[in-house]
Image (cartoon, grey):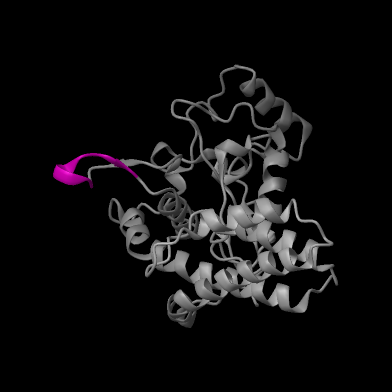
Amino acid sequence: MTDVTRTYLLEPGEGLLFTADPWQWAARTELFEGDTGISHEAVYAAPLFAHPVPMRPAEGSWRGVKTTMLWHPMLWLPEHLARPGMFPEGKDGQDIEEDIAEWAFRVMLELAQAGLYDPATGEWVDVLARVGIDLSMSDGVTRVQAWQDGAADDALDGFSIEPMLDQTQEAGWARAAARAEAWAMREAQWSRTANALLNFATENPDDQPPVQLAKVLAETAAASFQDIAADPDTGDDYALSFRGYAFEAARLDPTLEYRVDYVLNAVKLQLIEIEEIYRASRERVFRTLTPPTE
């Protein structure tokens, strides 16, 4: 049987990892939250991931999600992918919570390996269509809404995409891959994002006045580098610095040109440092991958 597929958020030729546009991931996150009705707190998004990842609460479900979005594979993740897991990887085998970016990386790996997203076409598999529910028809919508309201349904009760995942892989393969590769991918994206923001600051494509340019640059950097590591040499907290510059930029007096220039140049200097520190990771990762055109 041929799968029913849907185009959503992503473009043909785009994988689940990496973004070229520093604003794209945030705009997609806002759209996903609006389309699904999932709260911002229950969605993980970062520039490394081309699509936001919903985190289902423990012992919870997405019964409250907007019905017409329940075709999406990410809304039917099995328990071991639904949120960051606990793994016996601490001192003396103590359980520690999985790094959230490694969890999201693991989710993307599993979905890609299962063929539930096709990067060539930018299409997702409609997973409810695989169990005979057509959300493009009123009877399909009515059936799912009844289930959301508490009615029993043989297909939907306990449904997840677990049987659709690649069962030929060894147990824990995605976790092992995430631990081995996610950090390098993060570093590559940090360098990529910094480079894109520096190009934006130099080109100023919208011909914004300096005070507005400083505000946009500082706020975008603060949002994009929330999880960045501290400077490996000085220990300076880039994320904290960007938040500070964003706070100051929002309150700048445009007549005080020296303060505007200070914030703008300080943000650019930190972006230069980040681009240079992680350039080697970026070049190494992108030798073997084909990310979106810069």
Residue 14 in which image quadrant = bottom right
In the picture, measured across the screen, residue 124 lies left or right of residue 83, that is right
* Point 53% across, 25% down: residue: 154
In the picture, measured across the screen, residue 181 lies left or right of residue 248, that is left
Question: Is any atom of residue 5 visible in this view?
Answer: no
Across and down, in percent, residue 234 comes to 39, 67
Across and down, in percent, residue 224 comes to 59, 58
Across and down, in percent, residue 120 comes to 61, 69
Tell me which segment is drawn in magenta. 89-97
Question: Is any atom of residue 266 visible in this view?
Answer: yes
**Does residue 275 sit above or below 124 in this rendering?**
below
- Is residue 93 located in the magenta-colored stretch of the structure? yes
Q: Nearer the viewer, residue 175 or 275?
A: 275
Q: Nearer the viewer, residue 166 or 235?
A: 235
* Point 65% across, 36% down: residue: 133
Query: Which residue appears farthest toward the left when viewing the image?
Result: 92
* Point 22% across, 43% down: residue: 88
Residue 232 in which image quadrant = bottom left
In the picture, measured across the screen, residue 134 lies left or right of residue 19, that is right
Q: Across the whole image, how many numbered discs are drawn on residues? A: 0
Q: Nearer the viewer, residue 170 or 222?
A: 222
- Is residue 111 located in the magenta-colored stretch of the structure? no
**Does residue 259 sit above or below 97 in this rendering?**
below
**Does residue 233 sit above or below 168 in this rendering?**
below
For the C terminus, the quadrant is bottom right
* Point 55% across, 69% down: residue: 270
Q: Nearer the viewer, residue 18 or 66?
A: 18
